[in-house]
Amino acid sequence: QVQLVESGGGLVQAGGSLRLSCAASRSIFAYTTMGWYRQAPGKQRELVATITFAGSTSYADSLKGRFTVSRDNAKNTVYLQMNSLKPDDTAVYYCKSHWGPGYWGQGTQVTVSS
């Protein structure tokens, strides 16, 4: 069974931090690039960060320095550490496996209050 389950979202004040987790089925995690995306109300879904199986990372230019993506291959889990959060970071955050056709999690809401 293919599964991606995000957790760790919530309400945080501006300047605060959150750590998102995404637990994936082994079949769509191993040897696969994983990504974090987000979608704010009324906006298109956008790339936040990706990480290859070997640990190479890439980020949206606007988020470099505040967000860090990592993964634990033994736990089939990818993380997104978000620091210095801003109200503009408010969105539903999605985890994606880039294996095959691509698989999405259900999303986790992050709300940053001013």
Image (cartoon, rainbow, N blue to C red):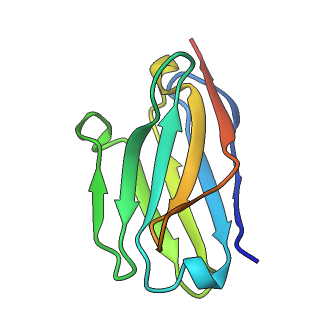
- Identify the residue shown where x is 47% and y is 45%: 37
Q: Is residue 92 above or below residue 25?
A: above
* Location of residue 56 (image quadrant): bottom left
Residue found at the very far front of the displayed protein: 101
Residue found at the very far top of the displayed protein: 114
If the image is split into quadrants, where does the C terminus sit? top right
Q: Position of residue 100 (x, y in %)?
A: 47, 73
Q: Is residue 71 above or below residue 75?
A: above
* In this rendering, position of residue 14 left or right of residue 110: left
* Location of residue 17 (image quadrant): top right
Q: Is residue 111 above or below residue 1?
A: above
Q: Position of residue 35 (x, y in %)?
A: 45, 58
- Identify the residue shown where x is 45% and y is 27%: 44
Q: Position of residue 14 (x, y in %)?
A: 53, 21
Q: Please tell me how many numbered marks the rendered image carries.
A: 0
Report the front residue among 6 and 20.
6
* In this rendering, position of residue 107 left or right of residue 51: right
Report the front residue among 113 and 109.
109
- Identify the residue shown where x is 54% and y is 67%: 78
Report the front residue among 58 and 44.
44
If the image is split into quadrants, where does the N terminus sit? bottom right
Report the front residue among 48 and 85.
48
- Identify the residue shown where x is 51% and y is 85%: 30
Q: Position of residue 7 (x, y in %)?
A: 72, 52
Residue found at the very far left of the displayed protein: 61
Residue found at the very far right of the displayed protein: 1
